[in-house]
Image (tube, rainbow, N blue to C red):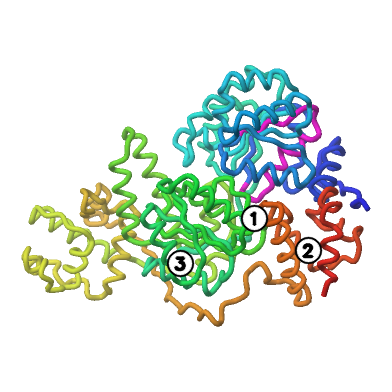
Amino acid sequence: MTSAAPVQSEQAPAGLDAALEVLHRVFGYPTFRGNQADIIAEVVAGRDALVLMPTGGGKSLCYQVPALVRDGVGVVISPLIALMQDQVDALQALGVRAGFLNSTQDAAERQRVERAFLAGELDLLYLAPERLRVESTARLLDRGTIALFAIDEAHCVAQWGHDFRPDYLALSTLHERWPTVPRIALTATATAATRAEIATRLDLTRARHFVASFDRPNISYRIVGKDQPRQQLLSLIRAEHAGDAGIVYCLSRASVEATAEFLNANNIPALPYHAGLDSRVRAANQSRFLREDGLVMVATIAFGMGIDKPDVRFVAHLDLPKSVEGYYQETGRAGRDGLPSTAWLAYGLADVVQQRKMIETSDGDAAHRRRLGSQLNAMLALCETVECRRSQLLGYFGEAGGDCGNCDTCLVPAEAWDGTVPAQKVLSTVFRLDRERGQRFGTGQVVDILLGKQTAKVEQFGHSTLSVFGVGTELRDAEWRGVVRQLLAQGLLSVEGDHGTLGLTDASAEVLYRGRQVRLRREPERTRAPSRSSARRSSVVVDLPEQAVGLFERLRAWRAATAAEQGVPAYVVFHDATLRQIASLNPSDLEGLGQVSGVGENKLAKYGQQILDTLHSG
């Protein structure tokens, strides 16, 4: 039994019949999405392309389909050595002849792949960028027929990007050695400046550029004030994501370890991932995360690039990301299957202080520090906005967007208020400590002075005699800290020294003496998190027809057993989105099953009868 004929996409350019046939027969999708058709047409025709498409937007199809249509082997350059096996497994499950060459293989395995390449027995070959710099690899490619070069994670070539890899710089020579082979460079996130740098460094300035929408409407963006962040994280998981897979990002290795231990102690299965772990432990933890349901990975930002796990239901940050690009890339690992997911960030004063100090002490020249400062300022603006977070996020990448109705500032609007007078009080306190006493202190001492607290430190330094002592009783301690945080975010205060003491900036005088207004964000009242007993069902089953929920869970159990038997991640068998559709349609025969998006010819033949038996076993 074969699947139904492919449907011509309205966006598909003429002459894409072969690509549409591959899309449907191999991958099981009836139509192209967005600008996939235009991109594929460009590469099939032998022309270069630079593609910006969000995580989960279907980037891989943009080179996989042309590689199957054009003569020869598609060569994919990817930095994701730890994931190549899973990528190849996923393609082989579709009936695609795929292989890889990287440093994890022994000589015999490499020779087997090389022989398959030369014999024309591969459709796709994955290479690490450092492997391509080895002359023997280049000579190997010379002896075969190359359909295309795909440069995945192309932002790695950007010198000041968030994942710079020196080996990527050498990829600019691809067109010199193989001038007739089309190149397609792909990335999930890049500003206009980063995109220009990618094009220049890879010599793709004359290539056609495709920029898809950065909008991920299935992700709910939420940023909360820090208040026992691990406990806040636990409440989030229990209330909204019980049993879901998730990623928690922390800035330090110690925080990763402590957070993973905390979650496990509270019956949330969690694994750590950071550079300090033994490589075998890291690999084992990554493998478990990809293959098991309901695990939480606690990691530094080194984890996650290229992770194909489609059912990550939440990404949480316990520390402030350094840039909007990094934040977007990391949150983009949630909800790759298009189902409802959460991007949650706990953010506080200490984050601003820490990031400012890190910039001041960073390597590089003044221009580099200014660039880092600009990136941080954009991230702080996203945290402090009273407008729609999604709209602000899209605006950073040059894309217009209205209120989304799905982020925290849309669902529970924050209030902007005139904070000029409180700002002047903070700045005056810092000024008097510095100019009148020659002293520098951190936030705590400044707040204590404003509140008129007779602490031992206040008595020690005689700060109760300052004219600003006790002039700030209209706000609570936490509110004053919020004012300081936002003044730091707006560049009206600076952080200096190892102890994070506060100082004035050039802009401070505009507030103190020239009448500049300061608008601040007032946090909405915190509502009590739902109790554990009232936690909603996992978002995976939300919106499924009631009669389909049991079928979906039955299919997930079959998929888990099948994946374990084959030693592959569950998504290599089928994505949740495909299982949801199968459960909703409840097909009675192979022909009906073949109509489901994501059920291609090979998977229909391999798993079709098992799925039907699973559906009707009850």
Give the mark nearest the N terminus, 2 or 3: 3
Which numbered dot is residue 263?
3
Q: Report the label total.
A: 3
Which numbered dot is residue 581?
2
Write the start and end of the magenta stretch as one range.
54-77
Q: Quadrant of the C terminus?
A: bottom right
Which numbered dot is residue 430?
none
Residue type highlighted by circle 2: Gln
Residue type highlighted by circle 1: Pro
Real-space Cα separation, disc 3 to disc 1, in angstroms? 22 Å
> Is label 2 or label 3 in front?
3
Residue denoted by label 1: 310
* Cβ–Cβ under 8 Å for marks 3 and 1: no
Give the structural element (helix, strand or loop) at label 2: helix
The answer to if 74 sits in the magenta stretch is yes
Give the mark nearest the N terminus, 2 or 1: 1
Question: What residue lies at 49% left-to-right and 70% top-to-bottom?
Answer: 413
The answer to if 60 sits in the magenta stretch is yes
> Is label 3 or label 1 in front?
3
Question: What residue lies at 70% left-to-right and 30% top-to-bottom?
Answer: 112
Q: Does residue 164 appear in the picture of this structure?
A: yes
